[in-house]
Structure formats: C-alpha cells, structure tokens
Amino acid sequence: MERNHSLLDSTFSTRHELFRKVAFHEAGHAVAIYLRNKQQQLPPVYFHIALDPHASAAFQHNYLAKVEGGRLIENLPVSLAELSAMDEPAYLAAFEADIVNLLAGPLAEAKYVARRDNEAINRHLVNLDALEFYGGASDLDIVNEYIQSVIACRQQRNRIIDKLFIEAFKFIDSPQHWDVIYALATHIIHNTKIVIPCEEITAVIEHALQGTNRMADR
C-alpha cells in the first residue's frame, strides 16, 4: 500500500497538492483496515504509516508514504484446496477484507479529487481500471495477486472483484466514514514524524468516529 512520486521538477503548490492526495489515499487504507475489519468482526492487525522524512517536511526529494502491515493474509495459498473445510470461511472473509482495504485507498483519493474539483463521483464514473490514476497501481497488483492465487476461473474472479469494488466504494462514500478518513488525512498532512504508529492512528479514528456519532445523535 504505497505511493511513490518524483517531485524534483514540480512546483511547491503541485507538491503540496500531491501530498494531500497521498494523505487521503493512505487514510482510506488505514480507516478501512481498522474500522471495516472491526465492523466485520475480524481479528485486529498491526499497521502504521511510514513517511519519507525529507519529502513530508520540505518536499525536497521523492515523496513516499505508505501503510505498512495491516493485511490479514500474509502468505497466500496456491488454491483453496490447500485449506480445510473448517478454515475456508475464515480465510475467505480475510481474503475479501484485505482486497476491500486495498481498494479503499485509491478510491478515497479519487473521492478527494472529485470533491476538490466540485465533480460528481460514483462507482460508474470511477471504475476499477481508473484507480491507476489515483495511485492505485501497486494496490491493484496486490489485488490481482490475491485473486489469481485463490480463484482459477476468470469469470468468478471478475464477479468477486466487482462485488468487492462496490463494497469498497460504499465504505468510503459513507458520510460517516468519509468524515473519519478526512480527519485522519488531516492528521497525516500535519504530521512531522517519520512513522505514525498504530496506536496514534486508531486514536485519531476513534476520536473522529465519536464526533460523527455525536453529530448523528443531535
């Protein structure tokens, strides 16, 4: 889950805007990993956000920010045949959650760009292939690795990825979730550390979530 850009020849305003897009991208990943996994009653996983100390502060070199960790499945089986009947449902739940969490990053960036430009966004205007334009190339590579490692039938792969794409879009498009993503992205933008630890990320998410719940109760 990473974005890597060369900023050497760009203007300060361009670099600053790129930083904001990256922040929303990584916030999308992080909020989905923590919040959606919790909603799905999946095991908690450790993750943090690593930033390039030079680029995040002075924008002098390549900018790199990424969520490290956070995946429920680290070692993919060759096929579902390797799993016992007892293990298969839990594995498939983790498999699908990881894919949704991967897609949530570029989708959050796409939503940020659409709102910045006062444009509409829906899952028909932004499809799976378009995510490459929102820093999603590496995320899509991992998604393809997941799908191809587990599902042999191409038609079944397409059905599953379409379903999970819709789930990821619904997650980031929820007003409550978007407010939380916005809060974490803002925290990333103003961060001055090399690593934002998991405990700090989850504290920001929980604080933002409490704020959205209070607003909903009014």
Image: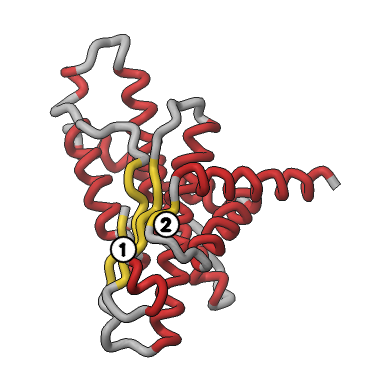
Instruction: Please say if the residues under marks 2 and 1 sit with CB atoms less than 8 Å apart.
Output: yes
Colour style of the rendered protein structure: secondary structure
Residue at the image point whose x is 78% and y is 50% from the top: 215
Q: Is residue 62 left or right of residue 217?
A: left
The correct choice, above or below, for 149 with respect to 10 in the image is: above
Q: Can residue 87 be seen by looking at this rendering?
A: yes
Q: Please give the residue where the numbered disc 2 appears in the rendered image.
A: 26
Q: Looking at the rendering, which quadrant does residue 71 occupy? A: top left
Residue at the image point whose x is 54% and y is 60% from the top: 187
Q: Looking at the rendering, which quadrant does residue 209 occupy? A: top right
Of residue 61 and residue 178, the one placed in the foreground of this image is 61
The x, y position of residue 191, in whole percent, is: 49, 64
The correct choice, above or below, for 210 with respect to 74 in the image is: below
Q: Please give the residue where the numbered disc 1 appears in the rendered image.
A: 3
Q: Which residue extends farthest front?
A: 193
Q: Earlier in the sequence, mark 2 or mark 1?
A: 1
The correct choice, above or below, for 47 with respect to 152 in the image is: below
Q: Can residue 125 be seen by looking at this rendering?
A: no
Cα distance, mark 2 to mark 1? 9 Å
The x, y position of residue 163, in whole percent, is: 41, 40
Say which mark, if any, is on residue 106: none
Q: Of helix, strand and loop, which one carries label 1? A: strand
Q: Looking at the rendering, which quadrant does residue 152 occupy? A: top left
Q: Is residue 158 left or right of residue 101?
A: left
Of residue 108 and residue 131, the one placed in the foreground of this image is 108
Q: Amino acid at mark 1?
A: Arg
Q: Which residue extends farthest left?
A: 78
Q: Of helix, strand and loop, which one carries label 2? A: helix
The x, y position of residue 53, in whole percent, is: 35, 67
Residue at the image point whose x is 59% and y is 58% from the top: 183
Sort mark 2 into few (<14), some (14-19) or many (20+) by Cα contacts within 10 Å.
many
Q: Amino acid at mark 2?
A: Glu
